[in-house]
Image (spheres, helix red, strand yellow):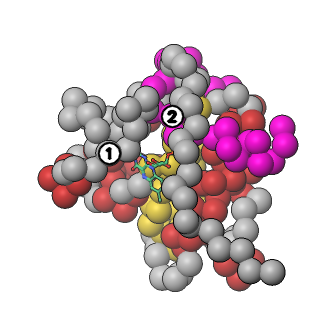
Amino acid sequence: MDVLELVKKRRSIRKYSSKQISHEAMVKILEAGTYAPNAGGGQRSYLVGIRDEKIVRRIGRLNFLPFDRSKLLGGHVSDEQPSVIDDSRIEDGFYGAPAVVVLFGQADFPFSVADAFCSAENMVLMATDMGLGSCIISRGEETFITDEGKALLKEWKVPSNYICRAFVILGYIDGEYPKGKPRRPGRVMLVE
Ligand SMILES: Cc1cc2nc3c(=O)[nH]c(=O)nc-3n(C[C@H](O)[C@H](O)[C@H](O)COP(=O)(O)O)c2cc1C
């Protein structure tokens, strides 16, 4: 697919079928994540791809727990693909997606957040090109503050000085693919 066409096609998907993505798809998406631009060329991000749906549901719940809707009252994200901001019945920060990539960055590296989101963008574009749904999810650090969260980090051999910066949820889209949102005008200046 033409790159601009792909970039315009990508949408945040929050309605998933229960069908799991393949091992091969996860490997390819992780590979795309590792090829992102990264500050200083240090390749510091640590990516954990999870296709075990039970574990994904556990983390989705841990991700939702620190969510404070009262801080976002009046916010609106999407009617077609409602987020936790839009629909108070949603209690899974991962929206039932069967797979997730957890992105970690070095705690004391000032560009670790930027690095993580560059990787995340590569991965959501890769997923879109493969016909999969995806969505970038935040509240990374808060997701793992409980003992249950900390135990998962140990299991995944996440270095102790690393912090979760973001997630990319993945799966097959349930229902219609959302329409493109129009771009807000006046955000681009061209000087030539
Ligand atoms: C830094 C960042 C954090 C985000 N965090 C969340 C999140 O926690 N939950 C969620 O449902 N969507 C999250 N999103 C997705 C945005 O809501 C989405 O990109 C935005 O509404 C635009 O819609 P689109 O991606 O379909 O174009 C995040 C996106 C970015 C870039």
**Other residues around mark 1 within 10 Å, as few (<14) / some (14–19) / many (≥20):** few
- Near-viewer residue (143 or 15): 15
Q: Which residues are magenta?
A: 1-22
Which of the 4 quarters of the picture holds residue 91? top left
Is residue 9 found left or right of 136 in the rendered image? right
Task: Give the vertical position of 159 relative to 101 (above or below).
Answer: below
Residue carrying label 2: 13
In the structure shown, which secondary structural element does the residue marked by tag 1 occupy?
loop
Name, please, the residue furthest toward the left.
Answer: 70
Residue carrying label 1: 76
- Near-viewer residue (184 or 26): 184
Which of the 4 quarters of the picture holds residue 189? bottom right
Q: Looking at the image, which residue is at 71% across and 74% down?
A: 190
Asked if the residue at label 2 sits under 8 Å from ligand 1, the reply is yes
| Cα–Cα span, label 2 and label 1 | 15 Å
**Other residues around mark 2 within 10 Å, as few (<14) / some (14–19) / many (≥20):** many
Kind of residue indicated by mark 1? His
Q: Looking at the image, which residue is at 53% across and 81% down?
A: 109
| Any part of residue 186 in sight | yes
User: Horizontal and vertical percent for residue 118?
Assistant: 63, 62
Task: Give the vertical position of 46 relative to 133 (above or below).
Answer: below
User: Horizontal and vertical percent for residue 5?
Assistant: 76, 42
Q: Looking at the image, which residue is at 69% across and 53% down?
A: 122
Q: Earlier in the sequence, mark 2 or mark 1?
A: 2
Q: What count of labels does the image hold?
A: 2
